[in-house]
Image (cartoon, coloured by chain):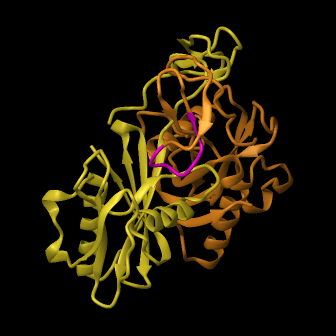
Chain colours: A yellow, B orange
Amino acid sequence: MPFPSRFKHCPNCGAAVDYRVPPDDNRERAVCPGCGAIHYQNPLNVVGTLPVWEADGRVLLCRRAIEPRHGLWTLPAGFMELGETTAGGALRETQEEAGADVEMGPLYTLLNVVRVGQVHLFYRARLRSTAFDPGPESLEARLFHEAEIPWDEIAFKTTRETLHRFFDDRRRGQGFGPHEIDIA
Amino acid sequence: MPFPSRFKHCPNCGAAVDYRVPPDDNRERAVCPGCGAIHYQNPLNVVGTLPVWEADGRVLLCRRAIEPRHGLWTLPAGFMELGETTAGGALRETQEEAGADVEMGPLYTLLNVVRVGQVHLFYRARLRSTAFDPGPESLEARLFHEAEIPWDEIAFKTTRETLHRFFDDRRRGQGFGPHEIDIA
């Protein structure tokens, strides 16, 4: 997944845009020769949770029913929407993708995925129940002990890094985030 | 500043878009009846720093030379750009707006400004020098002791909240973030 594709037309009036550096700016932007609007494209946030069943320390993963990475495992996460907070979006994605009932905790990882123009934010979450109800984006939702994690079938580096940090932190009994990680 | 204005035309082909809920989605999106593209609009990140001159504890503010809030004071911050990390963007804004030489520290505040669809991320930063060189977006860049902060002339709630938290944390000698704050 590369950067979002560049605007060819003005979302305001439909005219073909030019790319040039506007006055008082230092980067090329899509500038409309028709209505004069300047259109910016910026990184997007992906928000999710690291849900833990504290009775035995297992973590919740979802198996993707959609592309990309159909059939692989991920922490519940998705694009943050207008009208919500980062934690609110992470909770919504956890409900939508896993049907899980969680109590939200603090921010745990902030991962910059520069190549695709994304920032991934994962929150710690405490599962209140082990009853799940995966939505249409998930084939299944399941709890895993550390030794059971399907490391070769993890969908995204940001899930992999977040899980690694969590198990490391837990072994050392300290340092529970937040961790800032840049993904190459 | 309300939400970003809704797309009227397709940025891909220029046709007028419809607003409807695409298959496998649960929100209205701009859908192009011409080329079939679906266009999403999502919250944007504003990244900045809380630069401190540790010799005497003063913090750096910039007086805005641009709208909105021309003439008012702000921590150095601006929209995160494609191709950079959150901390990288915060450093760039600090250099562009204040011409300040800083060593970046950890994330200090994450503020959700839901009403305008923005997430503001401020990093702690240690000033290496008190020589500043404000760019075209700033009228001046200046160091302030806590007692000198022009509270009635602060441009944005996210700057105000970040400063309040910092002075509170410093007084108590603990809890140096990160703080997650939702702005009403």
Q: From the viewer's perspective, tell me whether residue A137 is left or right of residue B59.
A: left
State the residue in front, B63 or A76: A76
- The spot of residue B121 in percent (x, y) is 56, 52
User: Is residue B45 in sight in this rendering?
Assistant: no
Q: From the viewer's perspective, tell me whether residue A139 is left or right of residue B127.
A: left
- The spot of residue A127 in percent (x, y) is 41, 81
Identify whether B147 is placed above or below B129: below
> Magenta-highlighted stretch: main secondary structure?
loop
Decide whether residue B26 is among the magenta residues: yes
Identify whether B177 is placed above or below B21: below
Q: Residue at x 47, y 29 (%)?
A: B37
Q: Residue at x 25, y 50 (%)?
A: A70
Toward which corner of the image does residue B182 lie, by quadrant? bottom right
Count up the numbered dots: 0
- The spot of residue A176 in percent (x, y) is 37, 74
State the residue in front, B173 or B38: B38
State the residue in front, B114 or B56: B114
- The spot of residue A121 in percent (x, y) is 44, 58
State the residue in front, A76 or B53: A76
Q: Residue at x 62, y 22 (%)?
A: B16
**Residues in magenta, as a range:** B23-30
Identify whether A73 is placed above or below B62: below
Q: Residue furthest bottom?
A: A55
Q: Quarter of the image containing the C terminus of chain B?
A: bottom right
User: Is residue B137 in sight in this rendering?
Assistant: yes
Q: Quarter of the image containing the N terminus of chain B?
A: top right
Decide whether residue A28 is among the magenta residues: no
